[in-house]
Image (spheres, rainbow, N blue to C red):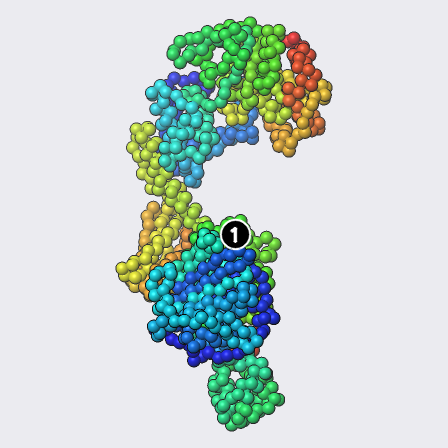
């Protein structure tokens, strides 16, 4: 069953299905339970058809034979009730708000915000719905976009606002809302050759100041670190709907590699909806391990955590590609990592005058 | 009305000894001097009150003056000192009713308070101010006392009769003693301080009320403690005993012979020593080839030697032990619980034993949990004759005893098996004896002694086992609690919400519960009935399995402590000493059955925990299966049928001897250890007195020796 958008009734039915599984089992004299896919890198596999990483076959059963699991089941029921109330009343809430509301659930309280978030995701997976169907919003900051592209956003007064991300926005660009689906955000027009996603605010500002978007006819997206779902979704939509290449320009360290993986292959936590969030064709531009060497960039030693992360990536199925293995191994050998802003060693304009044109040239985009 | 103990006071004089040897007497450092001074005053007060049958009320006030000076004020509500004895009591060393009689006392040599007066005079140049009142006189005597150490006399001045009004209560004092002494001393807080000393003293003297205040010169309070009494029972009055021949040296024997008025050797032996029966007296004389009708005064040196050799060879009765006054389990528990907030207190009072002719007794209290720090070394409270030992912890036999135990077996961290273990535990260890051997004159640390060490180890192992049982029980209870919470609270909620959400009827949860629990649980409840003065105990067995279950359960109860069953359970019967059995009706799945009984003859809080055993298939969480072989042994021992007469005697003695304090976690059942080593087995310490016994044989503990559930 594909996880397409459901209307209200179907969402409620799906949620009730979770409660029904529990009730049916109890009627049979058996302890209630929930069955979920295992959500770790040991259970993600590449789905050929969809071209992204999805959860595999391993299952974990949460049932009422231990106190911890039983509490999880109770919490799930509370959350289901809460969501159904929101759907019926047309309201929505943030994950954090839900966490605080749960403080009043007595035995069904959460221990932490994280537990609450995880349960919402569990329900997404089990019901094959999206968080947006549940009317739950994250706290995460959406991305910022600057470039000659035009959106239409449905504002809170119920009116469609037309926004061009170069002429109608200030220096920080357009702020991507939490929901970037058609009902909320429409892609109208564009006049660009490619989309470039950037990790750090500093680099984003540098490119804006140097007029890089105008010079090279691109849309610049500031990811703000680990990109939010909405960020990854909008990138994918732009890629699909406008058929534009997506270039990813990050720092050169193991955490940035993971950022790229979440954009291109799907994040482990959201593997159930990878096909919505992953942009298969995204290309990693830099900073690569080779760049550190080739451009003799100022660099830092890898910390023990960095090394741990790199080694973990060697066994991560998303990095099984030959090129990636080579990059990771080179970095381990080198023992160094470098920030994208270290290009400033050669002057503030080096990145826009030399580095990016060279690298884009190799991709046929400059 | 208070007795005057004057008749028993004798005099000895070594006052000059103090001048030269104040370091032996505890005045060798400024900090120590203060503690010694307080100690002497408190010891005196406690001893005097106890002798007179008065519950002690002691007040210690310290004033910290400039230049390392302290004013010490000590006041008690004891019987007071008769006016014409004041000078002697305060003014010369070794004066007091304690010298020349042998019994357990705090101030073994009575040097005590005179030492304080001397020290005060030496370091402050001022005499000590004393106020004394005895109940039989209408007024109190007030005077200042200094000392002439060469002539060993007190020099008094300003002697007056006054009406003594207590400044704290405003009432006239009926009887008591008050001392005010200035001295060079350093006040401090923390480990080796007056505050700690008094705290420790209060723990082992639960019948005493001790008030402590330390102030600056301007009256501002720096430290303050009030230790209320937790018991209205005075410690058992100790009887003086005569020396026991096995501890005799040739010099003392000859002195006794010389000073003896008896006309016959048998009378001499029987009247001057304890433990000598007529038969034994005759045997001694036979072996040393002396005639009964010889006059003791006429015995020559070699003959005395022969007597001593004969004494060493024969069996004598043990010395009477009513010269000892241990703290006793329940009181120790109360004292400890009051001082240290905790979860679990376990005490062991070993039966008296003998070493070198001197009776002694070891008591141990272990307190666990609560406020104590979990990741530091345990707190150790050492006592000799109810007096706290605060120095030389490392060199003390009591400490060494603690260090020699493998505490890992009992659930405490003990890195490398050396030193003290770590954990939220305090151990109180008390050696009561008529003659405690210390490592030095300073009486800080107990000297090495094989028999004493053995007793210490046995008692520590016992409290250790109690601790281990307690921890095990807690862990099981916690697990059971979780399951109970699950089925009693979470599961019904799940059922209710799911049903409401779906608009369906709620399912019957009983089969679900049995599937989840899939175990049989045992729960205990204790309740004190104040009206009827009985302790009620209720045991509930829940059958949360899918099949009916049939069991008999056995519970331990403090029959050995003198408790009695009051209510009769028709299905219950006495299995053996301290063990009662019930045969239960078959419990259907999902149901429970309860056994209730009450026990009288105990006081509130004396019995709050039991150990439950069962016969039947499967396992019960919260109870252990019965080991029938051990049970058979126990029954046999109780009936007096043993393998051999001697063995049985020893076993019965052992049973009687290791009478534990009836407290939490310390039931009569004692499971042997998995892989029991020599260290673990309770030794067979013979109670009769032969020449100092050698080590213990490895004999398992006799009474109630159940095997616990495998981990």
Instruction: Tell me the residue at 56%/93% (across/down).
Output: B298
* B293 is higher (above) or lower (below) than B382: below
- Nearer the observer, B63 or B23: B63
- Residue B364 drawn at (x, y percent): 48, 63
* B308 is higher (above) or lower (below) than B708: below
- Residue B127 drawn at (x, y percent): 50, 68
- Residue A218 drawn at (x, y percent): 58, 9
Instruction: Tell me the residue at 32%/28% (across/down).
Output: B502
- What is the chain identity of the residue bearing mark 1? B
- Nearer the observer, B145 or B698: B145
Tell me the quarter of the picture where residue B250 sits: bottom right
- Residue A109 drawn at (x, y percent): 40, 34
Is B141 situated left or right of B385 in this image?
A: left
Count up the numbered dots.
1
Instruction: Tell me the residue at 43%/20% (across/down).
Output: A132
- Nearer the observer, B285 or B215: B215
Asked whether residue B484 appears in the rendered view, the answer is yes
Q: Which residue matches tag 1?
A: B423
Is A7 situated left or right of B372 in this image?
A: left
Q: Residues within 10 Å of mark 1 (few under 14, many from 20)?
A: many
Q: Residue furthest left?
A: B531
Q: Of helix, strand and loop, which one carries label 1? A: loop
* B343 is higher (above) or lower (below) than B383: above
Q: Residue furthest front?
A: B158
Q: Quadrant of the C terminus of chain A?
A: top right
Is B497 situated left or right of B437 in this image?
A: left
Tell me the quarter of the picture where residue B580 sits: bottom left
Instruction: Tell me the residue at 36%/49% (across/down).
Output: B543
Q: Quadrant of the N terminus of chain A?
A: top left
- Nearer the observer, A248 or B575: A248
Asked whether residue B696 appears in the rendered view, the answer is no
* A224 is higher (above) or lower (below) than A166: below
């Amino acid at each position: 069953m594909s996880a397409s958008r459901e209307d209200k009734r179907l969402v409620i039915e799906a949620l009730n299905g979770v409660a029904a599984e529990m009730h049916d089992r109890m009627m049979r004299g058996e302890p209630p339970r929930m069955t979920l896919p295992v959500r770790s890198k040991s259970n993600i596999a590449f789905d050929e058809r969809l071209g992204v990483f999805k959860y595999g076959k391993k299952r974990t059963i949460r049932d009422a034979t231990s106190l911890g699991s039983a509490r999880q089941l109770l919490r799930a029921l509370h959350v289901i009730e809460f969501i159904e109330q929101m759907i019926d009343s047309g309201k929505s809430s943030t994950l954090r708000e839900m966490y605080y509301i749960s403080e009043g659930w007595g035995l069904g309280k959460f221990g932490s915000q994280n537990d609450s978030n995880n349960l919402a995701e569990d329900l997404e997976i089990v019901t094959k719905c999206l968080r947006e169907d549940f009317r739950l919003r994250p706290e995460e900051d959406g991305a910022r976009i600057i470039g000659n592209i035009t959106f239409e956003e449905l504002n809170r007064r119920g009116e469609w606002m037309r926004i061009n991300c170069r002429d109608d926005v200030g220096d920080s660009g357009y702020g991507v809302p939490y929901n970037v689906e058609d009902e909320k955000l429409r892609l109208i027009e564009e006049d660009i050759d490619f989309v470039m996603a950037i990790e750090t605010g500093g680099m984003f500002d540098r490119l804006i100041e140097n007029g890089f978007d105008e010079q090279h006819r691109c849309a610049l997206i500031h990811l703000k670190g680990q990109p939010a779902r909405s960020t990854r979704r909008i990138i994918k939509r732009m890629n699909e709907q406008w058929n534009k290449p997506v270039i990813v320009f990050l720092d050169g360290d193991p955490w940035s590699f993971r950022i790229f993986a979440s954009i291109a292959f799907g994040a482990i936590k959201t593997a159930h909806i990878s096909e919505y969030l992953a942009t298969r064709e995204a290309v990693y531009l830099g900073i690569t391990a080779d760049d550190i060497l080739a451009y003799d960039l100022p660099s830092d030693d890898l910390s023990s955590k960095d090394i741990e992360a790199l080694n973990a990536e060697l066994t991560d199925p998303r990095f099984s590609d030959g090129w990636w293995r080579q990059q990771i191994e080179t970095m381990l050998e080198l023992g160094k990592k470098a920030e994208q802003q270290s290009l400033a060693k050669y002057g503030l304009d080096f990145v826009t005058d030399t580095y990016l044109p060279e690298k884009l040239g190799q991709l046929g985009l400059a | 009305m208070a007795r005057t103990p004057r008749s028993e006071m004798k005099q000895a004089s070594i006052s000059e000894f103090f001048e030269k040897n104040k370091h032996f007497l505890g005045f060798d450092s400024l900090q120590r001097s203060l503690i010694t001074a307080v100690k002497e005053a408190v010891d005196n007060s406690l001893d005097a009150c106890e002798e007179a049958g008065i519950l002690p009320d002691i007040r210690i006030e310290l004033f910290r003056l400039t230049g390392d000076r302290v004013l010490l004020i000590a006041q008690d509500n004891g019987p007071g000192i008769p006016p014409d004895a004041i000078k002697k009591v305060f003014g010369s060393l070794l004066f007091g009713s304690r010298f020349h009689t042998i019994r357990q006392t705090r101030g073994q040599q009575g040097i005590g308070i005179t030492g304080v007066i001397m020290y005060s005079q030496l370091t402050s140049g001022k005499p000590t101010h004393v106020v004394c009142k005895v109940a039989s006189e209408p007024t109190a005597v007030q005077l200042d006392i200094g000392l002439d150490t060469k002539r060993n006399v007190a020099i008094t001045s300003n002697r007056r009769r006054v009406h003594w009004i207590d400044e704290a209560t405003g009432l006239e004092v009926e009887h008591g003693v008050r001392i005010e002494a200035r001295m060079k001393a350093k006040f401090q807080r923390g480990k080796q301080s007056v505050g700690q000393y008094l705290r420790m003293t209060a723990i082992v003297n639960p019948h005493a009320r001790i008030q402590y205040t330390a102030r600056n010169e301007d009256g501002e309070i720096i430290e303050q403690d009030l230790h209320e009494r937790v018991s209205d029972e005075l410690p058992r009055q100790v009887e003086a005993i005569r020396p026991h021949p096995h501890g005799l040296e040739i010099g003392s024997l000859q002195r006794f012979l010389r000073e003896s008025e008896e006309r016959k050797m048998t009378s001499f032996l029987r009247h001057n020593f304890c433990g000598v029966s007529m038969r034994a007296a005759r045997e001694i004389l036979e072996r040393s080839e002396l005639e009964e009708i010889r006059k003791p005064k006429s015995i020559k040196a070699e003959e005395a030697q022969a007597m001593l050799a004969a004494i060493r060879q024969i069996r004598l009765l043990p010395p009477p032990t009513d010269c000892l006054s241990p703290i006793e389990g329940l009181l120790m528990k109360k004292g400890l619980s009051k001082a240290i907030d905790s979860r679990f207190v376990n005490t062991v009072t070993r039966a008296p034993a003998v070493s070198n002719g001197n009776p002694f007794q070891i008591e141990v209290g272990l307190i666990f949990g609560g406020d104590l720090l979990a990741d530091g070394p345990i707190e150790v409270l050492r006592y000799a004759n109810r007096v706290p030992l605060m120095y030389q912890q490392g060199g003390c036999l009591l400490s060494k005893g603690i260090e020699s135990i493998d505490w890992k077996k009992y659930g405490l961290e003990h890195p490398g098996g050396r030193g003290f273990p770590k954990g939220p535990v305090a151990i109180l260890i008390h050696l009561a004896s008529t003659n405690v051997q210390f490592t030095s004159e300073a009486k800080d640390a107990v000297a090495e002694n094989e028999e004493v060490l053995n007793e210490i180890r046995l008692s520590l192992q016992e409290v250790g086992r109690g601790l281990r049982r307690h921890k095990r029980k807690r862990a099981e209870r916690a697990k059971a609690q979780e399951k109970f919470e699950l089925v009693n609270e979470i599961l019904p909620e799940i059922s209710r919400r799911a049903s409401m959400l779906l608009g369906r009827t709620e399912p019957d949860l009983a089969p679900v519960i049995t599937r989840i629990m899939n175990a049989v649980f045992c729960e205990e409840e204790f309740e004190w009935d104040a009206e009827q003065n009985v302790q009620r105990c209720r045991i509930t067995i829940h059958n949360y399995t899918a099949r009916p279950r049939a069991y008999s359960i056995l519970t331990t109860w403090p029959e050995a402590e003198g408790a009695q069953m009051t209510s009769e359970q028709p299905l219950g019967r006495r299995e053996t000493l301290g063990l009662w059995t019930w045969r239960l009706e078959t419990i259907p799945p999902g149901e429970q059955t309860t056994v209730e009984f009450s026990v009288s003859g105990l006081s509130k809080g004396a019995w709050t925990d039991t150990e439950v055993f069962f016969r039947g298939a499967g396992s019960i969480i919260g109870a252990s299966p019965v080991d029938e072989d051990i049970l058979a042994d126990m029954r046999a021992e109780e009936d007096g049928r043993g393998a051999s007469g001697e063995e049985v005697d020893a076993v019965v003695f052992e049973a009687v001897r290791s009478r534990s304090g009836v407290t939490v976690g310390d039931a009569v059942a004692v499971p042997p250890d998995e892989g029991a080593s020599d260290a673990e087995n309770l030794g067979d310490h013979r109670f009769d007195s032969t020449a100092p016994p050698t080590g213990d044989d490895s004999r398992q503990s006799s009474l109630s020796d159940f095997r616990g559930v495998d981990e």
